[in-house]
Amino acid sequence: MLTKYAVLAATAAAAVAAAPTKRAAAGQADIDVVILNYALTLEHLENAFYRDTLATYDAGAFRAAGYPDWVRQRFVEIGGHEKAHVDFLTKALGDQATAECKYNFGVTDVNTFIATAALLEGIGESAYLGAAQNITNPSTLTAAGSILTVESRHQGWVSSSVLQGDGFPRDTSTPLNFNQTYSLAAPLITSCPSTNPALPVKAFPAATVTGDVCGGKTVTVAGQGVQSGQYAAFLAGLSVYYAPIGDNGSVTIPQDVGYGRIYMVVSKVNNSIADDNVVAGPAVIDIPLSSTQAEEISPLNKN
């Protein structure tokens, strides 16, 4: 009997073996292999997060934090999905597959576990979405897309059912490129096997946003290399909104950024977030949207 991901794994494996010879750069492996290993790097991280943290916090710990048993049970289910994703990608890549690293998630209790789960699921969704445009083989794209939709449902469930927020506050999701995603994952990775294939990614310096984070409000942006005269670029859905950085890192967030998961990077210019222009980031921003606000701003209520 075929396992849940057996057909997709076989398809992706064939795609890796037969993929065209387009290169990410001279001397690098085929781009689809690079992308699948990039995805596997993230899936290893998520799998280890759920496996190890749920082993620490049992149902009693969740009850003590105010969560019914079904919340932990669903997180166990999500952890099973992440393990299946690891197995699927590992089988597809064969002997080219990257191995699990060692991590420090900084989880100290059930609440920080849930906050980290919301963070990681949102990053996973954005990572798969951003990588899609670089995949050359249609079968590989389909396989990645099948995982993307599951990651998106995970994120929506944590945001709505667990955190009692809006699980779908935007009409489009926000993609992240390779270096943007790796910059968010790298602080959680403490070491990796020396035999792991090198990925063509780098981590930008971290950036922070403090203050009343909402469209139209003035906040403070900080990070290595951040200075006045640069720009805070807010990645919101498929749009990027720029705002100048003033003295002491002051930035007025553009009103149009909207709600939900947004990422901020610091750019040297006000019209590009290409890697060569990025100074620091991304910082993760979650702007809550109540059901009342959602109804008020809905196009259905506009003439």
Image (cartoon, helix red, strand yellow):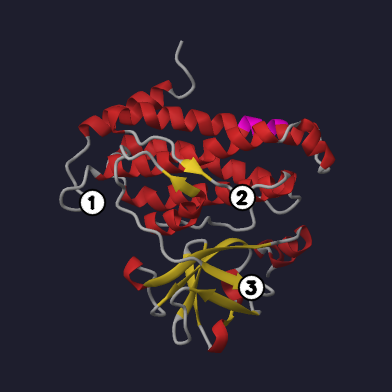
Q: Is residue 253 visible?
A: no
**What are the residue bounds of the magenta stretch?**
73-77
Mark 1 crowdedness (10 Å alpha carbons): few <14, some 14-19, many ≥20: some
Q: Assign the C terminus to one quadrant of the image.
A: bottom right
> For mark 3, what is the residue?
210
Q: Nearer the viewer, mark 3 or mark 1?
A: 3
User: Residue 24 shows which numbered tag?
Assistant: 1
Mark 1 is on which residue type?
A: Ala
Q: Is residue 248 above or below residue 267?
A: below
**Corner quadrant of residue 211:** bottom right
The reply to whether the C-beta atoms of the residues labelled 2 and 3 are less than 8 Å apart is no
> For mark 2, what is the residue?
106
Residues 143 and 98: in front is: 98
Mark 3 is on which residue type?
A: Thr
In the displayed structure image, the side of residue 241 where residue 140 appears, left or right: left
Task: Measure how far apart labels 3 and 1 are at the Cα level.
Answer: 37 Å
Q: Is residue 13 above or below residue 158?
A: above
Mark 3 crowdedness (10 Å alpha carbons): few <14, some 14-19, many ≥20: few
**Corner quadrant of residue 8:** top left
Mark 2 is on which residue type?
A: Gly
Q: What is the residue that sits farthest to the bottom in this orientation?
A: 247
Instruction: Measuring from the top left, give residue 219's x and y in whole percent.
Output: 62, 78
Task: Measure how far apart labels 2 and 1 are at the Cα level.
Answer: 34 Å
The reply to whether the C-beta atoms of the residues labelled 2 and 1 are less than 8 Å apart is no
> Helix, strand, or loop for circle 3?
strand
Q: Examine the residues drawn in magenta and state their main secondary structure.
A: helix
Query: Which residue is drawn at the image coordinates 41% and 38% (left, top)?
Result: 40
Query: Which residue is drawn at the image coordinates 76% and 50% (left, top)?
Result: 164
Task: Measure how far apart labels 2 and 3 are at the Cα level.
Answer: 20 Å
Residues 300 and 258: in front is: 258
Q: Is residue 20 above or below residue 184?
A: above
